[in-house]
Amino acid sequence: MVYDVIVIGKGPAGISGAIYSTRANLKTLVLGKLDSMLLKADKIENYYGFENPIGGRELLETGLKQAERLGAEIVEEEVVNIEKTENFNIITVDGQYEAKTVLLATGAPVVRVPIKNLDKYEGAGVSYCTTCDGFFYRNKKVGVLGYNDFAIHEAADLLNFTQDITLFTNEMELNVSDNAKPVIEKLKVNNKKIKELGKGDILEEIVFDDGTAEDIEGLFIAFGSASSTSFALKMGIVTDGKSIIVNEKMETNIPGLYAAGDCTGVFKQVAVAVGQGAIAAREMAAYIRKK
Ligand SMILES: Cc1cc2nc3c(=O)[nH]c(=O)nc-3n(C[C@H](O)[C@H](O)[C@H](O)COP(=O)(O)OP(=O)(O)OC[C@H]3O[C@@H](n4cnc5c(N)ncnc54)[C@H](O)[C@@H]3O)c2cc1C
């Protein structure tokens, strides 16, 4: 089945988008995890319509129920890749979906991993995109920094280029689905805490807190879930380095792909996320009808 709209993210931006798109009679699927920034907000008292403060969780859960009541399909799934074909293929940990338009509403990108010299080696051995750079590391010894399904997806991608792959979890516990197990069997796993990346102008080694080091030719960063910036790197979505760049219609530079909420880096507030989600849905409806 081809959805009219797939929303990635079930925070206020994504859910608002889904409310508007279902009410525009568009077949809408929301893919996301219950880890919105709103869950960290104890009380919200600057969002329109509530006389008394409302808890972030309650606001979020009410929005989810509202979208479901209106007909949006909401599935708890982590998205690991988006591919542009004639439509969009959305690859998740457990499956694949197709849509005519996509709304990226994944919230603020995950904070960078605090490893010394990571910045220094970006583009010189450190990469954020297996699709873009995997080919450069054919038969080389590479690492993937990560601990969950996104990292396993990236490692699976790299297995097309090399069999010498180590998963560096940086002391995080592996948190993966059953689907990941056949891939993990093909990897080495190193759980040590990383102190720094090192050697000359090009990455050559990973140094651990315990004083040991391991030679490496490339390191792919996939720490935490795929964020808007990871999708941007894979698909060529224009960013300012941290946030997705959108125009006043919430369009990215890729036709049919829209973004809303904290991932666009504007005033990070529920009211703004909800407003942007609404604009994006209206524009997605116009895009589909024009096509
Ligand atoms: C402590 C705190 C207090 C706050 N207080 C206020 C306040 O008082 N008033 C106010 O207006 N705002 C407040 N905010 C800000 C507000 O929470 C955010 O602006 C708002 O949640 C942004 O909505 P969003 O939909 O863009 O992103 P989020 O709410 O962060 O939602 C992102 C969604 O994307 C999903 N996602 C991410 N990556 C993937 C992936 N790879 N696959 C699938 N799903 C994915 C997540 O699971 C989540 O569902 C506060 C924030 C914090 C942290």
Image: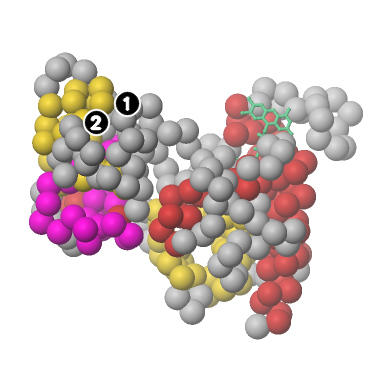
x and y, in percent, of residue 251 in the image: 65, 63
Q: Is residue 105 left or right of residue 151?
A: right
Query: 83 above or below 171?
Result: below
Q: Residues within 10 Å of mark 2 (few under 14, many from 20)?
A: many
Report the amino acid beneath label 2.
Answer: Leu
Q: Is residue 85 left or right of residue 171?
A: right
Q: Is residue 197 left or right of residue 17?
A: left
Q: Residue furthest front?
A: 201
Please give the range of residues in magenta.
131-159
Which residue is denoted by mark 1 in the rendering? 116
Which residue is denoted by mark 2 in the rendering? 197
At 66% across and 39% down in the image, what residue appears? Answer: 61
Quadrant the C terminus occupies: bottom right
Task: For ligand 1, tell me if the residue under mark 1 lies within 8 Å.
Answer: no
Q: Are marks 2 and 1 in contact (CB under 8 Å)?
A: yes
Q: Give the secondary structure at mark 1.
A: loop
As for residue 157 lying within the magenta part, the answer is: yes
